Image: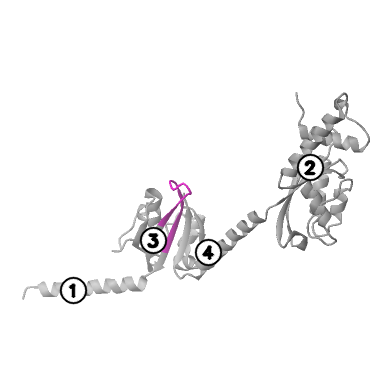
Amino acid sequence: MKRDLSAQAAQAVELQSNGLQPVETLGRSNQDLHADLALLDAVTNSLPSHIAVLDATGAVIMANALWRDCGSKQRPGCAVLPRSAVGVNFLEKVTQHPDRSARAQGGIAAVLDRSIPRFSMDYACGSSNCGGQHQFNMTVSALQLVQGGAMVTHTEITDRWKSEQAVLRSAEIQRSMLSALTEGVIIHDSQGNVIEHNAAAELILGDVLTWMRERKSDGSSWKLLGPEGTALARAELPLMRVLSSKKPCRHVVIGNQRPDGAVTWLLVNAEPVMDAGGRDLAFVVVSLADITDQHLMQQKLHKSRWRSNKARTRPS
């Protein structure tokens, strides 16, 4: 069975650095060993990460071109975790990096003593050596060799980090917009659970929103009314209709009757938000506006018209 080429080459490098030769390579020509090492060097140099192999003590025994190039450009005070030269102890160099030494040193040491198989951390670099603000990920993975050791990779994740920051900024802007609205907005998941709402929704609904969010009571202390003042079944709520049909439900007038008998009249819209595939429901966004004054005015107008029509049709 063939051994993993990178593991074999890494072992060969370490033993050769100590003037030894692994047993399994006895009988192989130096030309074969150099070919293995040349192949490994070519593979690691083609990768976009900074890569180094450490022995069990943390000393660098092999590094690819990106690692060596970055290490040659580092200056005192550089914000990037060190790229130690071959033969230099990487673990010791990390302890001299005050900003991140405790976490990085602990993680690397744990991998080297085989307490954990892998350690990973993200870090920032604003050094001029890197051309401005960059983000990196360092991953340390244990080598499956008898003598131990680890492989360290530093991978630039600046683009991913910028995308994540853009999403966070967008979410923050959206939350700010929701907070500024006088209309209540409630976001439900595909099961109807409340996952987010703005302050206006809490002001408009009060205890109703608490019940919707926490379900700590049966909701019997409040009643929902249709436009004519009759009881409204919960199945007729815009949210429930969207959950069942996956279609928008708009311009629905609902009365929220509080325990003291007072009624707040609301104009409610519910919009479905589909998943990326466009087939399954991901969220339902419900908006509601307090139209109590307008609704009461309309009711008075309707009653006035009704009385007027009745008076005209009364026999003389």
Which one is in front in this view, the residue at disc 3 or the one at disc 4?
A: 4
Q: CA distance from mark 3 to mark 1?
A: 33 Å
| Residue 275 is a magenta residue | yes
| Quadrant of the frame with the N terminus | top right
Q: Amino acid at mark 2?
A: Met
In the rendered image, which residue does mark 4 sit on?
174
Picture disc at residue 269: 3
**Residue stretch rendered in magenta on the structure:** 271-287
Picture disc at residue 307: 1
Q: Residue, x 84% and y 60% (percent of image)?
A: 75
Q: Amino acid at mark 3?
A: Asn
**Element type where label 3 sits in the image:** strand
**Element type where label 1 sits in the image:** helix
Of the pair 255 and 147, the residue shown nearer to us: 147
Disc nearer the start of the sequence (3/1): 3
- Give the residue at the far right of this rendering: 19
Number of marks present in the image shown: 4
Check whether the beta carbons of the residues at disc 4 and disc 2 lie within 8 A of each other: no
Q: Amino acid at mark 4?
A: Gln
Q: CA distance from mark 2 to mark 3?
A: 56 Å
Based on the displayed image, in which of its 4 quarters is residue 28 positioned?
top right
In the rendered image, which residue does mark 2 sit on?
151
Q: CA distance from mark 1 to mark 2?
A: 89 Å
